[in-house]
Amino acid sequence: MSWLSNDLKSFKRSWLHHTGMQLATLSVLTATFAVVALVLSLGLNVNRILASWGETVQITAYLDENVAADKVSGIQSQLEKLPSVETVVHIPREVATQNFKSQMASYAPDLLTDSDFENPFPASFRINLKGGVHTEQDFAALEKIAAAVGKVEGIEDVSYGQTWVKSYASFVNAIAASGGVMVLILLAGGLFVVSNSIRASITARREEIEILELIGATSSMIRRPYIVEGAAMGFVAALIALGLCFGIQAWQLSLVSKNLELARLAHQVTYLGPALTLAFVACGTFLGAFGAWATVRRINDGWSALQRQST
Amino acid sequence: MISFSHVYKTYPGPVHALRDITVEIQKGEFLFLTGKSGAGKTTLFRMISAFDKPSSGQVQVAGYDLAAIRANEVPFYRRKIGVVFQDFRLLRGRSVFENVALPLEIRGDRVQGLNRRVDDMLDHVGLILKKNAPIEQLSGGEQQRVAIARALIHQPGVLIADEPTGNLDPQMSEEIMDLLDRVNAQGTTVFVATHDHELVRRRAKRVVNIDAGHLR
Ligand SMILES: Nc1ncnc2c1ncn2[C@@H]1O[C@H](COP(=O)(O)OP(=O)(O)OP(=O)(O)O)[C@@H](O)[C@H]1O
Ligand SMILES: [Mg+2]
């Protein structure tokens, strides 16, 4: 008879003896894991969406009004030679005005027909960069390129949504940091719950532990069933939590996609991938096992019978 | 097989539970330990079962130096001895068979040989018909026989029993002593603590008496 089959029997006994406690632990652990999974998934999606915004950061270089028309292509090729620049598109005055008018059409229809409307827009270049802007370092690089663009002869002004990009970069950082802190707090709570439940199991089976010690079970033999119990609890909780998380996401997406304006957003949302799912279950199992281990390690030092056996 | 040499055990208080204990028990011997309540019998047995270490002196059992044994060696030492208690110490909620098989499982025996050995042992203690009964359904005498079977299943060289008949009526006590006699006849060293002087007198074995921590 292998000792492992004993672990499983012992696990079963432990369930039968305190089903209530075990169920309570399992639900708390499941809820904790579900929130962690949601935070993870949300963080992932926010990051992805923000990253796709970061990809679209552009530099607009406004041309000096007095630049002669035949110089424009020379300036353009000069800009294209700058490092990190991917494409440079020339936008003449008239096009800029047209763009503005069509964007404003729904807000101020009169504007389109107003003959008094003067053209305030200078000609410009729209510069797309290689890679995007996702971190504070990327932002520093962006500032450098913008400065280089500004030094080009004939460029009057450079704009790249300076403050917006800067706060965007720190926003991404803040989201990542607060998500991480929240997950850590939740995991600590999960650890506590598992360890509590295992402690109850141990107390309920104190006598059994003493007897096992008495007939020569090593402390690792005695600890193992509890670690298996903790691992099983973590495993099951992680599975249910993932199911819950997928369910909640699917439900929210179905709500969101009913709303036309948000439907486009719904397309960008993804679930945790297979690798992350596996990693999540593995981490849940590990957390359960670790919580149990930390508890038995303290309680069973191989001499627990010593404390009581005095008649 | 068991040897105590100038053993002292002092508990915080201070309680001098054992004082200058020196005794030698030969292989295959049957020895009674008598003494009033609080005299130090259990304390002495706890030295032998490695649940406690002497404050000073030497304890040697089955080739192990118990005054110096390391914690990770203790389980392996305990697999070489058999221990029986007044309160049986059986696992509740499990069958007679499961209780007796436990030391072999811990040792890692194969299922086949294990089944046969447990059956033989249950036959030996007269409990083969109760093999699958849960422990709770047995009488005190039957439970003590299960405990003895468990203490012997791995064929230890030494069996120590701390008041094995303390919770049993006189007739049951005699049956248990008969069983221990037979075990001893097969070569196991047996060391029994009891305060039942009648029982000791009828058996005509070597007896040591402990009084306030002193052997005499
Ligand atoms: N863990 C302990 N801490 C302090 N004192 C103890 C401890 N264990 C035993 N003692 C004391 O040591 C003395 C011997 O106790 P022991 O249990 O060995 O007696 P005993 O002969 O087994 O008695 P009984 O026949 O009642 O079982 C007693 O005075 C007891 O109070
Ligand atoms: Mg005693």
Image: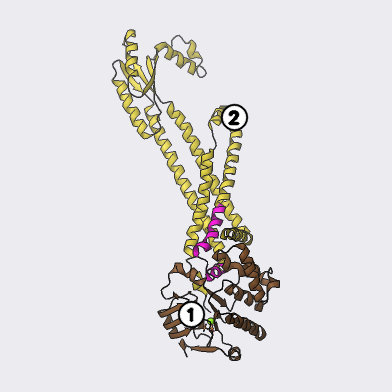
Chain colours: A yellow, B brown
Direction right: furthest residue: B129
| Magenta region | A207-233
Point out which mark residue B1 bears.
1
Q: Is residue A166 left or right of residue B190?
A: left
Q: Which percent across, then down, holds residue A42?
A: 51, 38
Q: CA distance from mark 2 to mark 1?
A: 86 Å
Locate residue B108: give its quadrant: bottom right
Q: Is residue A105 above or below residue A145?
A: above
* Chain identifier of the residue bearing label 1 in the image: B
Comparing marks 2 and 1, which lies closer to the viewer? 1
- Residue A259: numbered disc: 2
Magenta-span inclusion, residue B137: no
Q: Residue at x 53, y 76 (%)?
A: B157
> Mostly what secondary structure, the magenta segment?
helix
Which residue lies at the image location 51% right of the left edge and 72% below the top edge? B78
Q: Is residue A216 magenta?
A: yes
Quarter the N terminus of chain A occupies:
bottom right
Which residue is drawn at the image coordinates 59% and 62% (left, top)?
Answer: B110
Q: Amino acid at mark 2?
A: Asn
**Left or right of B78: which side holds B101?**
right
Q: Nearer the viewer, residue B121 or B146?
A: B121
> Between residues B54 and A180, which one lies in front from this camera angle?
B54
Q: Position of residue B182 (x, y in %)?
A: 61, 81
